[in-house]
């Protein structure tokens, strides 16, 4: 799961990045609201954590603009303000949840887990699509129709996790590159094709009725095969 953290206070940001990476999240950090909005527009983030008080644009403005532009990424707002009016403004601007500083790390992680479940189909704690069940904790993909399971590589797991949590959407190569390898990585697009081929073979191996379909000129879509 990839998280966008927008926080301009360097110590807080460093601590949060370390915490989230320790919890096996992929994290991209920006220090101002304009950068946060640009990053959100990429469409590759599962959750955005926005501080309210930031340079250029505050968190409220980022959330409001993102929602007006059709960006549906779940947003958790962080702020030192605890007044009711501030919480209301945060939620009205489009934030999905609101956490007041200082906070316990357990509460932050619990709220992130809750937000991460909103866009995905879960059953028994596993991501599900069609006859597939994906256990992200063990990197195991299971076909419920055949009972066959297979272990996934890290990149295969991230590809399927991304596609499971964005069901019904076409994922572009650009989105997949940033999502799996990160903004600062110089991975070439053909790497996406290579790992997509590996992932497709895993779907065939377990005997699934789900396929990853290439949509010409657009990208890839997870869908059930035509009967």
Image (tube, helix red, strand yellow):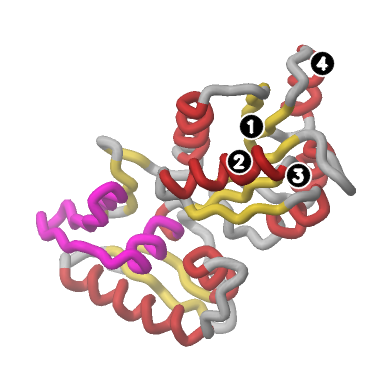
Q: Position of residue 186 (x, y in %)?
A: 57, 80
Q: Residue furthest front?
A: 11
Q: Residue furthest right?
A: 56
Disc 4 vs disc 3: which is toward the camera? Answer: 3
Tell me the distance, in whole angstroms, between the alpha carbons under discs 1 and 4.
16 Å
Q: Position of residue 174 (x, y in %)?
A: 59, 74
Compared to residue 180, the image places residue 129 above or below, namely above
Query: Which quadrant does the C terminus fall into?
Result: bottom left
Question: Which label was assigned to residue 85?
Answer: 4
Residue that label 1 marks: 96
Residue sitting at x 55%, y 66%: 182
Q: Position of residue 179 (x, y in %)?
A: 52, 64
Query: SS at mark 3?
Result: loop
Query: Mark 3 Cα within 10 Å, few/some/many (few <14, many 20+)?
Result: some
Residue sitting at x 51%, y 46%: 18
Question: Which label was assigned to residue 62?
Answer: none
Mark 1 near mark 4, Cβ–Cβ under 8 Å? no
Residue that label 2 marks: 74
Q: Nearer the viewer, residue 154 or 162?
A: 154
Assess whether residue 29 is covered by the magenta stretch.
no
Mark 2 near mark 1, Cβ–Cβ under 8 Å? yes
Mark nearer the N terminus (2 vs 1): 2
Q: Residue furthest left?
A: 147
Residue sitting at x 16%, y 71%: 205
Mark nearer the N terminus (3 vs 2): 3
User: How many numbered callouts?
Assistant: 4
């Amino acid at each position: 799961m990839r998280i966008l953290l927008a926080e301009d206070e360097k110590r807080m940001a460093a601590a949060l990045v370390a915490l989230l990476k320790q919890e096996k999240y992929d994290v991209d950090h920006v220090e101002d609201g304009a950068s946060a909005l640009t990053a959100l527009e990429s469409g590759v983030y599962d959750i955005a954590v926005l501080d309210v008080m930031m340079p250029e644009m505050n968190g409220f403005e980022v959330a409001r603009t993102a929602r007006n532009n059709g960006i549906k990424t779940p947003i958790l707002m962080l702020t030192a303000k605890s007044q009711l009016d501030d919480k209301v403004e945060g939620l009205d601007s489009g934030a999905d949840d609101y956490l007041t500083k200082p906070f316990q790390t357990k509460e932050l992680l619990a709220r992130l887990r809750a937000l991460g479940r909103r866009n995905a189909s879960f059953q028994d704690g596993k991501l599900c699509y069609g006859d597939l069940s994906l256990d992200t904790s063990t990197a195991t993909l299971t076909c419920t129709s055949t009972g066959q399971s297979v272990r996934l590589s890290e990149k295969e797991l991230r590809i399927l996790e991304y596609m499971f949590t964005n069901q019904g959407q076409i994922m572009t190569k650009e989105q997949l590159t940033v999502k799996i390898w990160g903004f600062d990585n110089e991975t070439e697009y053909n790497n996406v094709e290579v790992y997509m081929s590996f992932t497709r073979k895993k779907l065939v191996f377990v005997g699934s009725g789900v396929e990853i379909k290439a949509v010409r000129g657009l990208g890839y879509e997870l869908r059930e095969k035509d009967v």
